[in-house]
Amino acid sequence: MNRKMKKISSILLFLCFASTALRAQEAQMADTMRSEGKIYALVAIILVILLGLIFFLVFIDRKVSRLEKRMDGKN
């Protein structure tokens, strides 16, 4: 095995161990937030961020489409 493969395999192994260790904490944190009612605020914030990203992507797509049409007209 070359050095690059060893490095990749060690990183994957580390990520597996780290994700296993974090699962217990995530469940406890989610239960705590749910019991305190903060989970709904978190979901609302995530939705606002996702909707903002979707709006931004649609806006950029429309702008690029207009520029492409303009470029096709010049050529």
Image (cartoon, rainbow, N blue to C red):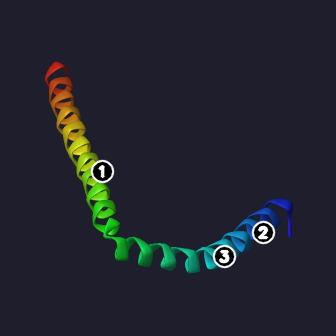
Q: Which of marks 1 and 2 is nearer the N terminus?
A: 2
Q: Closer to the camera, 70 or 57?
A: 57
Check disc 2 and give the amino acid type: Ser
Asked which secondary structure carries label 2, the reply is helix
Q: How crowded is mark 3: few (under 14 residues within 10 Å), some or many (20 or more)?
A: few
Query: Which marked residue is nearer to the observer: mark 3 or mark 1?
Result: 1
> What mark, if any, has residue 16 been given in the picture?
3
Which residue is at 57% across, 80% downward?
24
In which quadrant of the rendered image does the C terminus lie?
Answer: top left
Q: Residue at x 13, y 23 (%)?
A: 73
Mark earlier in primary sequence (3, 1): 3
Residue farthest to the front?
36
Q: Is mark 3 on a helix, strand or loop?
A: helix
The residue that appears at 18% across and 36% down in the rendered structure is 65
| Label whose residue precedes the other's in the sequence (3 or 2) | 2
Residue 34 percent coordinates (x, y): 35, 75
Q: What residue type is labelled 3?
A: Cys
**Residue drawn where x is 66% and y is 76% of the image:** 16
Mark 1–mark 2 CB contact (< 8 Å): no
What label does residue 49 carry, if any? 1
Q: Which disc, if any, is residue 73?
A: none
Q: Which mark is residue 10?
A: 2
In the depicted view, which residue is nearer to us: 26 or 16? 26
> What is the distance, in whole Å, between disc 1 and disc 2 at their CAs?
34 Å
Which tag is nearer the camera, tag 3 or tag 2?
3
